Amino acid sequence: MIHFFNSLSPDLKIYWAIALIASLIFVIQTVISFVGGNIFDDADFDTTADGDDVGVSHFFSVRNMVNFLLGAGWGGVCFSGAIASKGVVVALSVLTGLVFVAIFFGLVKILLKLQKDNTFRIEETLGKIADVYLPIPENKSGKGKIQISVRGSFHEIDAVTSGEKLPNGAIVKVEKVIDGQTVEVGKI
């Protein structure tokens, strides 16, 4: 291995050194990320609820520097054997490093969208229109069921009414949340 490294040109030695060191740090970062730690940055990506990046300051982080050096080092190793011009090799290796950072940003943005909380909360049904699924007895004398769409998902919820009996298929509006499982509805 040492003989191989000594036989390289000075610029290729630099590319190999950058590529190997960045690869080692990248592997360490990846392992630490999978076990739940983050010793390199407190918050590489602080995001809003939409998953959008908050600012340009998050572009400059240890993780992104490692990604850039990983792409630039391996880009330099790959392009130096194929292209004679050292200036073009440097430009292409820098471009490769920027592409690595862009790919990382894209992957993180996709992963952060998976963190969105889609938990159903019965309070979200207030004021919404629903269909009676099982008849609802009059004057809160028993429970029926309604079928309601909240954020594109259908839910069956226990319902009572303070008015007359509501038959299957009636259109109702949620007027009040009784408890975590039951709502009060009124006929429209």
Image (cartoon, helix red, strand yellow):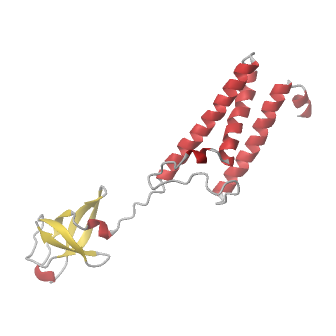
Where is residue 58 drawn, in percent x and y? 59, 48
At a point 82% along the width and 26% down the height, the residue shown is: 11
- Viewer-nearest residue: 145 or 75: 75
Q: How many marks on residues?
A: 0
Q: Is residue 130 left or right of residue 104?
A: left
Q: Residue at x 31, y 57 (%)?
A: 151
Tell me the quadrant of the picture where the N terminus can be found.
top right
With 137 as the anchor, is 154 left or right in this view? right
Q: Quadrant of residue 122?
A: bottom left
On the image, the x and y values in percent for residue 27 come to 71, 47
Left or right of 51, for residue 59: right
Residue 160 picture quarter: bottom left
Name the residue furthest left.
Answer: 164
Can you give x and y, in whole percent of width and height, for residue 167 in the image?
10, 70
> Eyeballing the image, is 109 above or below 120?
above
Hey, which residue is sitting farthest bottom in the picture?
Answer: 141
Location of residue 154 by image quarter: bottom left
Q: Residue at x 26, y 70 (%)?
A: 157
The quarter in which the C terminus is drawn is bottom left
Query: Relative to residue 138, is residue 39 drawn left or right?
Result: right
Between residue 138 and residue 88, name the one nearer to us.
Answer: 88
In this orientation, which residue lies closer to the viewer: 128 or 137?
A: 128
* Picture coordinates of residue 148, whole percent (x, y): 24, 63
